[in-house]
Image (cartoon, rainbow, N blue to C red):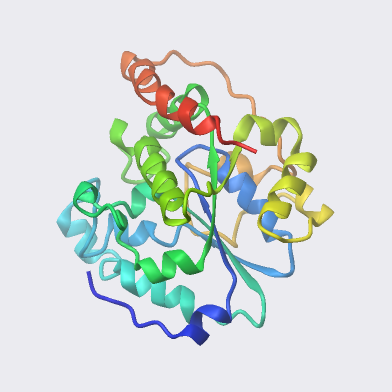
Amino acid sequence: MSTTNFTSSTMDEKKIIFLWCHPRSTSTAFLRTFIQREDFIVEDEPFEYSHFFGPERLSNRYSEKYCDQDKYGKETFANTVEKILKMETSGKKIFIKDMPKHIIRPDYLLHPDNPTLLPLHFIKACTHTFLIRTPEKSIPSYYRCYSSGQCPGYDHFDTTEAGYWQLQIMYEFLTNTNNGSRPLLIESDDLLRDPKSMMIKYCDGIQEEFDPKMLHWKPLTLEELKDSQGFNDAIQSSTELKEIQHEYIPYPNVVRDTIKIYMPIYEALKKFRI
């Protein structure tokens, strides 16, 4: 991985808040709350491009030929960090939703001081928060995306993409980096059960004033976000944080087995929720 040069002024001029999550954790709905704020610029999974398409890609979901031809085929993790740091904010803060599964190194056990592909200086300069959801809801939701046929490139169900073990690694790494002080973590069911209370707690945790505008929005095509056909269809017509009901479909054994695999990680992290 190439390195990124930092200056103290580059980091001091920007307040960068990360929401680390896993797929189907209601994270896009959470992102919508910050889109409503006039004092924030919002970025949706900027490290996804390096993860899936770039020369340092960690995923084998797309073929080498496809990645070489993709417009993000030259995107690196360092380039993405640099773009964030050079972003023209006009004094606004930056809110980034992304997933540890996009940045955790394959050989993370050999790098306990920094198991990610991001520069440690950058990580330490940012504020980190987490969102989790029970696998009993996220895994079936993820499977529906695959089976719908509406998600380009997602033609098979890969249990390793559930994102839970990477989330746990990131959470423990940041805890250790911060001398045992645990990052703020919210749970999806808590959020949807009482959005106002949870958003007030979240804003307090990141030392920002709560804005009532965060709780409601107009239906959009999510032009503020990158194209994510098949994944954000429901949220495009939403107007608030609430549980979305889906018609029941029978799930194969792999879905039930995947839920069992990741429930212990979810339960372990859930203990630290606000």
Please identify the residue farthest to the left as the structure is shown.
64
Q: Position of residue 257 (x, y in %)?
A: 33, 17
Residue 28 appears in the figure: yes
Direction from residue 160 to residue 139 in the image, left or right: right
Res 274 quadrant in image: top right
How many numbered markers are drawn?
Answer: 0
Relative placement, left or right, of 109 versus 197 is left
Indicate left or right for 32 with 51 as reference: right
Res 177 → quadrant: bottom left
Outermost residue toward the right? Answer: 212
* Rendered view: 231 above or below 245: below
Please say if 251 is above or below 59.
above
| Residue 71 can be seen in this image | no
Q: Is residue 48 above or below residue 162?
A: below
Query: Considering only vertical position in the picture, is 220 above or below 250?
Result: below
Nearer the observer, 215 or 144: 215
Relative depth, front residue between 29 and 126 = 126
Nearest the eye: 215 or 202: 202
Q: Position of residue 12 (x, y in %)?
A: 56, 80
Residue 224: quadrant of the picture: bottom right
Q: Quarter of the image containing the N terminus?
A: bottom left
Residue at coordinates 67% horizontally, 43% vertically from top-left? 237
Query: Which residue shows up at 31% across the image and 58% down it?
Result: 114
Q: How far from the left and from the top, in percent, is residue 67? A: 23, 60
Rendered location of residue 131, percent (x, y): 55, 42
User: Who's the residue at 22% across and 57% down the image?
Assistant: 66
Q: Is 268 positioned to the left or the right of 199 in the image?
A: left
